[in-house]
Image (cartoon, grey):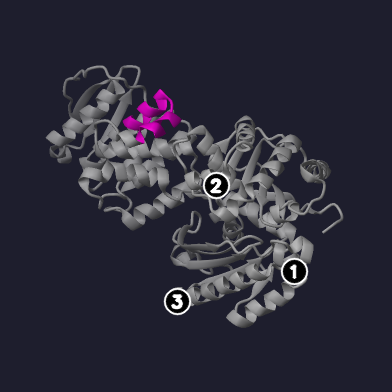
Amino acid sequence: MSDAGTTAQTAPTPMRGFFGNGLFKDPSVRALDRVGVIDVGSNSVRMVVFDGAARSPAYFFNEKILCGLGRGMTETGHLNPEGRARAMAAIRRFALLSREMHLTSLTMVATAAVREAEDGIAFKNEVEAATGLELMIIDGTEEARLSAQGVLLGWPGARGLVCDIGGSSMELAEVGDNTVGRRVSTALGPFRLQQVPGGKKGLRQHIADTLGALRDELGADHKALYLVGGSWRALARLDMERRGYPLTVLHEYAMTPRSIRKTLSWLEGQDLKKLRNDTGISPERIVLVPLATVVLRQILNVFRPREIFVSSYGIREGLLFEQMPDALRARDPLIEACRHAEAANARLPGFGRKLFDFLMPLYRNAPPDRLRLIRAACLLHDVNWRAHPDYRSESCFDTATRANLGGLDHKGRVYLGLALMNRYKNTGTDSRLTPLLKLLDESEIRQAIMLGRAMRFGAMFSIGGPDTAGALRYFPKKKLLELVLDPAMQDLFGEVAEQRFGALAKTLGVAVKVRTGRGSTKAAPLPAAAGTQAG
């Protein structure tokens, strides 16, 4: 660490040799492997086991202990004795659990507290003697790179500055074009900041000087800021509380500089104990929030981002991303997660693609972002079929809005949830879900309902796939929706199918025509509805 408390590096350093064999050795079994990561941080020790689709990992196991290894280290130079004992107990437990789970691989890394403590190497040796596992101590720039790669795991198109705050350090890294660029490690972790002299004024000046020195290295023109780390997540949860925000999913939560500044000012007059009770933030975490607010104010002042996002993905997900070949990294995490969900839970895996192709005439002019959500909805349209029929639509909504899905912002979650809800029912929404609809405008709500009703018809039209029974033709200027039936399959268009086709047309506000390949029926007008042209 330099006198200014920072270290910098301008180019990625490969770690594949450092970490040995790839986490997933054989691509053909990649989706079936269980891969463990133990992250020994300055504040917490966590074990995560990834399971399922590699590009959008599912969390088979996730447990953390807030040990506080780095608490008081600035004064003593040593790991916190109580934190060290708690960390050792947690690591021993995790080592035993990893054996019980028969993991394909297990990687254990230590960050700022262990790498900087005078007794860090002794702690490493104690861990390895007690567990038989290797504890790898990574430097600050590698920590920055891995955290940034975790962001890229969930945001393939992320472009801006990643900021990962831990207990004893804070890392910054540039991301863009699915790669990590310049990166630095600073001593701006809350445990370190507790020891800065000069009171509040001295603290603000120290943070401003440290970040100001980095402006030339990292640049100040970063449109987006991606926040990684428990203290940032706590601040985001408090921002939700102040705003009365209806969807308390932290991953991909978006804030503006103006909004977060309002929250930082609002916090100055709040009772943290009451806020902890209202939000569920842990006592160990919330005591660090006041220091984190001072840091974030200065980050906003120095780097001036225009958008701020929260990432639940960090160093652990970065370790997973590290081992992925470029072809896998290029895949869409949302679509991969939906494919995995369909393969694991749908009655007819593979049907979602047929449904998507069948509905495409409705979306000829839809932009790529919308088509992506439509594809995701088609893949997820049947994954909740085992739920009780009375609650199936609500279960679908929860799947989209609450599930661990990467590459999906909050508006996208609600859009998907509303579409999937309408895939199973034609009337209204549950009153408890109404506040979430405020995240969408009226046009987006109509579009989601229309997609749901399109899936509701297409999913039941033919079990073999709607494309085997007929094809849709959509003429928005003529306000006409046509269904062309395969002559051999026309009996599939029974009463229920006719009703659902009619409901779709009514949502679009168009007339319908149903014909076979050899003839046609007269176009039938439907009552105008609060619909809109698809796409």
Percent position (x, y) of residue 134?
63, 76
From the image, give the main secondary structure of the stretch colored magenta: helix
Label 3 CA crowd tier, 10 Å (few <14, some 14–19, many 20+): few
192 and 7: which is toward the camera: 192
Secondary-structure class at tag 1: loop
Q: Determine whether 433 is above or below 402 in the image.
A: above
178 and 57: which is toward the camera: 57
**Between tags 1 and 3, which lies in front?**
1
Dot 1 amino acid type: His
Q: Which mark is residue 273?
A: 2
Label 2 CA crowd tier, 10 Å (few <14, some 14–19, many 20+): few
Left/right placement of residue 206 relative to residue 459 reads right
Percent position (x, y) of residue 473?
30, 28
Residue 84 appears in the figure: yes
How far apart in space, not on screen, are marks 2 and 1 (Cα)?
A: 30 Å
Picture quarter with the N terminus: bottom right
**Between tags 2 and 1, which lies in front?**
2
How far apart in space, not on screen, are marks 1 and 3 (Cα)?
A: 33 Å
Q: Which mark is residue 55?
A: none
Q: Determine whether 2 is above or below 84 in the image.
A: above
Q: Earlier in the sequence, mark 2 or mark 1?
A: 1
Residue tagged by mark 3? 100
Left/right placement of residue 126 relative to residue 427 reads right
Secondary-structure class at tag 2: helix
